[in-house]
Amino acid sequence: MANLSGLNAGAVNPNPNKSFEVLPAPSDSVSSLSFSPKGNYLVATSWDNQVRCWEILAGSSQPKASISHDHPVLCSTWKDDGTTVFSGGCDKLVKMWPLMSGGQPTQVAAHDAPIKEMAWIQQMNLLVTGSWDKTLRYWDTRQAQPVHTQQLPERCHALTVRYPLMVVGTADRHLIIYNLQNPQMEFKRIISPLKYQTRCLAAFPDQQGFLVGSIEGRVGVHHLDDAQQSKNFTFKCHREGNDIYSVNSLNFHPVHHTFATAGSDGAFNFWDKDSKQRLKAMARCPHPIPCSTFNHDGSIFAYAVCYDWSKGAENHNPATAKTYIYLHSPQESEVKSKPRLGTGGRK
């Protein structure tokens, strides 16, 4: 019996990769994770209406501060100088939080429906927000009104910026590409190369294309240049037998320019798009991974493990549901690109 109970304990281990746990954990599922561009400060937004910040030190996490919204928070981003955090969500407004100076949050932006995505654009000194009200809005945080409102074909699901490239994914699989040197014009609009709903996007570090992930366990690698279309491909991931899971997060490594995927199967993997191979498959956690991110130098990969409602309310038990935020320290062999050996075999 001892062996059987040991097996059962192993089966529900929430941390099979022996990652470092960030404490205290949020009381409800995490919707976004973002590291400061200047240091190891991690911000998490969650469905319990909170925005929390921890300082990540060697071998420990120190809770630094938190603020509240009136409704669940869906997204956050840091200002490029690492002083300030922006957050938004189901209360349809954006709060600017001067976290490092200990200041109080103030409202700096608003939409007519929940705010799903946001990014700080350093080169424009503007915040861009994407909403389910089918608009993108650009904000000078010193002004009450947006400096520009851009209509979208549908609700915003995903957004990625690598200036001057910005890609927005909406409902109905629209992907709208912008050159931020001319943000009031669409540079190009395409239908996703994936057949199902867009869940996440990540612009290439060289701004020449982007990754798109869908709810159907698949990632598309897409180049902007028409002459490079032969390099486009899609690949399957986050699948287990006949079970197909959503790809929830795509993150490029800031140094090696390989990338991570995280999914509702509870797994995260590291990939090299140029050699078309998986560099490392990590052990599956027993709950979905709704979001993930690298820190500024790629030495830490943060990921949340919690229920993502993909199996409905009937599979959610508030009494036993737990939320975890973990930190993985990638080995160079996991994230550094390597030439593909031979031509056979699948990625």
Image (cartoon, grey):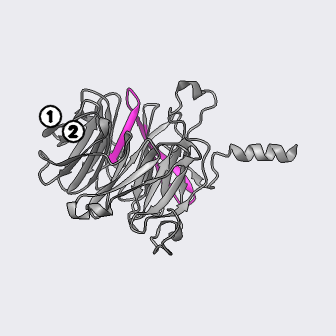
**Farthest-out residue, right:** 1
Q: Residue 215, how many percent across, how many down?
A: 43, 41
Residue visible at 61% across and 54% down?
283
Q: Which residue is mark 2?
A: 136
**Measured along the vertical axis of the image, is residue 123 above or below residue 318?**
below
**Farthest-out residue, top:** 314
Nearest to viewer (mark 1 / mark 2):
2
Q: Is residue 122 visible?
A: no
Q: Which residue is mark 1?
A: 145
**Residue bounds of the magenta highlight:** 51-77
Magenta span contains residue 73: yes
Q: Residue 325, how many percent across, how many down?
A: 53, 46
Calculate the distance from the C-alpha at mark 1 to the C-alpha at mark 2.
13 Å
Task: Name the quadrant of the N terminus.
Answer: top right
Q: Residue 47, how many percent across, how many down?
A: 45, 32
Residue visible at 51% across and 62% down?
346
> Which mark sits nearer the N-terminus, 1 or 2?
2
Judged from the image, the secondary structure of the residue bearing numbered disc 1 is loop
Residue type, mark 1 in image? Gln
Judged from the image, the secondary structure of the residue bearing numbered disc 2 is strand
**Pointer 1 and pointer 2: residues touching (CB < 8 Å)?**
no
